Amino acid sequence: MNRTGFLQHSLAEGEMFPDFILPSAEGKLVALADVLARGPAVISFFRGEWCPFCRLMLDALSDSLPEIEASGASLLALTPETGGLPLVMKERHQARFEVLSDVDCGVGLNAGVIFRLPRLYRARLEKAGLHARERHGNDTWFLPVPATYIVGTDGLVAWRFADVDFVRRPEPADILAALRRLPAQD
C-alpha cells in the first residue's frame, strides 16, 4: 500500500458520514440514524479480534465508555469480521457498546479507510491460520486502517483520527476532549 496520500481520500471533519444499517454482534440491525437521534456517535474501525493492537484499543474504549456515555455519545465498533466473530470480540472485551459487522467493508470503503492487503502480508496471515473467507465471508482481503470518527447528530464528522500505521491509535483522552468540544445538544 502506498502510504503517501492514502488518507487524502478518507472523510474529513465537516463531511457527511456514510449512513448505514449494520448487523450487531447479537444479530440485530443498528441504524446510524437511530443512534444519532440519541446523540453523537464515536465510530471506530477495527481489523478484528486477531489484531493485538485492536484488542488493546477495544479495552481502552471499554474503560472509557462511562465517560463517553456521560458526554451523551454512543460508541460503535465496526469490524469486517462476520458470523459469530463480532460476538466473540464483544464478549472477550466485555464490551457494553455495539460491535457491528461492516459487511464487505461497505461503510469503511465509503469513509475511505479501507485498503487491500498486499500479497506477502496475506500469505503471512494465512500461514498463521487467518483466512479472509472464514473471517470476512469473502476473499477480498480488505481491512480498515485505524480510524475513529466522532459524528455529530447532524451526521457530519466533527473529529477524526486516521493513520495508515496499524499500531497508532487515538488516545481515549483525545476522543473525550473532542466530545467535550461538541456544541450542546438540544
Image (tube, rainbow, N blue to C red):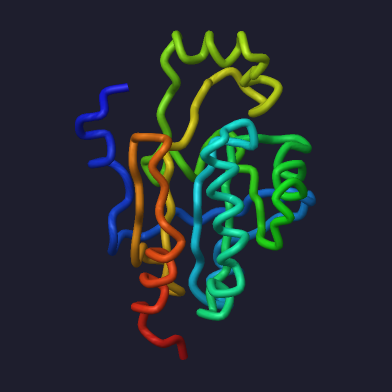
Q: Residue at x 34, y 35 (%)?
A: 164
Q: Quadrant of residue 156?
A: bottom left
Where is residue 17? Give x, y as percent: 41, 57
Where is residue 39? Give x, y as percent: 53, 77
Q: Quadrant of residue 179?
A: bottom left
Q: Residue at x 69, y 49 (%)?
A: 23
Q: Residue at x 44, y 9 (%)?
A: 120
Q: Is residue 129 above or below residue 15?
A: above
The residue positioned farthest toward the left in the image shown? 4
Front residue of 46/170: it is 170
Image-based side of 92 in relation to 46, left or right: right
Q: Is residue 123 above or below residue 32?
A: above
Front residue of 93/36: it is 93
Front residue of 157/65: it is 65
Where is residue 18? Give x, y as percent: 44, 53
Image-based side of 181 in relation to 21, left or right: left
Query: Where is the N terminus found, in terms of image quarters?
Result: top left
